Image: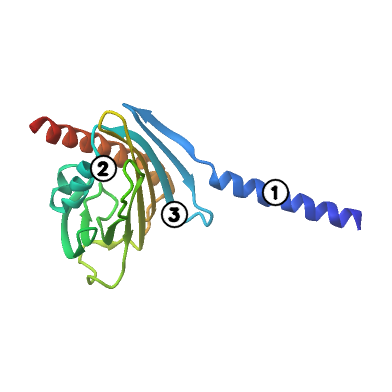
Amino acid sequence: MKIKSLTIFTLFLFMLTAASAQDKWELRRNEDGITIYSRQSPDGKLVELRLLCQLDATPGELIKQLMDIDSYSSWVYSNKKSGIIKKINDHDIIYFTEAHLPWPIQDRDLVVELNIEPTTTPNAQQIIQVKSINGILPPKKHFIRVPYSMVTWRITPVPGNKINVDYTFSLDPGGSIPRWLINLTLTTGPYKSFVKLRELLKAERDKR
């Protein structure tokens, strides 16, 4: 009985340690005020990423840029084309996006719903979610439809008309992409996108 109890306890500790390892973010890049982490999802199928940075913008300025879907090709890495499919209201839109990826990866496309959670409390954290949805557009030739994507922006105002951004991203890219290639390019897109986003927000502010 003691041996059986010890075996069960050891198995429990192993499972607890494994779960803790899956929850732990691993630092992948820390450059120009942009910190990027990644981790493996519990089922091992999803690419999960977390990015932390500070931007010279108010929540309203960032939201305005995120709602300008047609401009995504000017700052979102590998974005080929984006467009609004349906505007549900001022806080909720459905749009498509197409990504041109380097050879030998086939180009991807996806349809997502962007939702901004309203807040009436001054200086409160603002949450924006961008989640893939199915059944809106038929498959496109030469593209692989991304089966799952979830982005969450947590935006916190700080003094000086700045915001702290906590950005998390989970993705099942669909199709067949070697794990080594995913790991090789994991931080490139998010890092370059946020560098361009920071430049755009600064340029808009300098105009005023």
| Viewer-nearest of discs 2 and 3 | 2
- Relative to 195, is 145 above or below? below
**What is the quadrant of residue 166 in the picture?**
top left
- Of 190 and 161, which appears nearest the observer? 161
Local crowd size for mark 3, using a 10 Å CA cut-off: few (<14), some (14–19), many (≥20): some
| Image disc number at residue 88 | none
Residue 65 % position (x, y): 18, 45
Q: Which residue is mark 2?
A: 59
Residue 63 % position (x, y): 23, 47
Q: Secondary structure at mark 1?
A: helix
What residue is drawn where x is 38% and y is 57%?
A: 176
Local crowd size for mark 1, using a 10 Å CA cut-off: few (<14), some (14–19), many (≥20): few
Q: Which residue is mark 3?
A: 46
What residue is drawn where x is 25% and y is 34%?
A: 195
Residue 172 % position (x, y): 39, 57
Of labels 1 and 2, earlier in sequence is: 1
Position of 8 with respect to 37 (left or right) is right
Which residue type does callout 1 highlight?
A: Phe
Which residue type does callout 3 highlight?
A: Leu
Quadrant in which the N terminus is drawn: bottom right
Which residue type does callout 2 highlight?
A: Pro
Residue 76 seen from this side: no
Q: Secondary structure at mark 3?
A: loop
| Viewer-nearest of discs 1 and 2 | 2
Position of 114 with respect to 70 (left or right) is right
Q: Are marks 1 and 2 in contact (CB under 8 Å)?
A: no
Q: CA distance from mark 1 to mark 2?
A: 43 Å
Q: Which residue is mark 1?
A: 14
Residue 98 % position (x, y): 21, 56
Of labels 2 and 3, earlier in sequence is: 3
Q: Are marks 2 and 3 in contact (CB under 8 Å)?
A: no
